[in-house]
Image (cartoon, grey):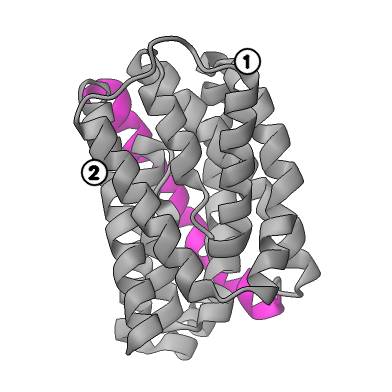
Amino acid sequence: MFELFEIGVGAAGPLGFAAAMAAVVLAGVLRGFAGFGAALVVVPVLSIVYAPVVAVPISFLSGLPALLQMLPTAVRHADRAFITPVAVAAFALTPLGAWALAIAPAGPMKIAVALAVLAMVWFMHRGWRLERRPGRWALATAGGVAGLIQGAAGIGGPPVVTMALVSADDPVRQRANVIAAVTALSLATALPLWRLGLFTQEVIALSLLFVPAHSVAAWLGARWFERSGHRHYRQAALAILFAVGLITLAMALHNQFF
């Protein structure tokens, strides 16, 4: 463990490592409470502290144990009729999104995704909900779009989170559906990352260093939801979605024009 600590500090310096660890802890709390939003915190900070090329694979590997520890709860409460079409479509189209990333300009793509996310948040804030449960094709479409965005831009959660929030379910089921869908998206990302050779020894070492803090923080976030947070889940999820859209838009515009 001490050797891993030396790798983490040596690659970033004490202040950089402290910032990375703080981001990992905050991301864990978000993951445990809302079921999504971890990458929003981890990827930008790790991109600055270490390098953009290692930020996404570290985010995936360090968050994987927390995802798996939350999965049994999600399986108990999630709606299988919601999750199955979402997961199948996400697994099918995430590699296509990664391929699109390799041939298409990433800047305009991320700007479009961010604007779409902000539009969805606005509609939901105005009280928009589905009058009936979404059908299998609607869910498959949401999962497919999420997979494409996940592969191309790394923020595939919003379409399926939106579909969960506008469904007429209680907060426990909404969160369980979100966790299961985000887990499917995360696992669908593994093959493209592996094919691109991004699971290097440095990435694995840094991920192992961050796993304990992220997992404990996710457990605390889940406890917060169980005790009192379920009463505010929809508002919190909308706030996180808004932050995802706003930060993604700001970063994409900065990279595109400055």
Circle 2 packing at 10 Å, graded few (<14), some (14-19), many (20+), is some
Q: Is residue 11 above or below residue 94?
A: below
Q: Looking at the rendering, which quadrant does residue 202 occupy?
A: bottom right
Give coordinates of residue 205: x percent, y percent: 61, 73
Q: Which stretch did the figure color magenta?
A: 200-229
Q: Is residue 147 left or right of residue 23?
A: right
Q: Could one spot residue 24 in this view of the protein? A: no
Between 157 and 13, the residue placed more toward the observer is 157
Q: Residue at x 53, y 24 (%)?
A: 74
Report how many numbered discs are placed on residues in the image. 2
Q: Which residue is mark 2?
A: 239
Give coordinates of residue 144: x percent, y percent: 64, 41
Between 186 and 82, the residue placed more toward the observer is 82
Q: Which residue is mark 1?
A: 81
Q: Is residue 78 above or below residue 145?
A: above
Q: Is residue 6 above or below residue 158?
A: below
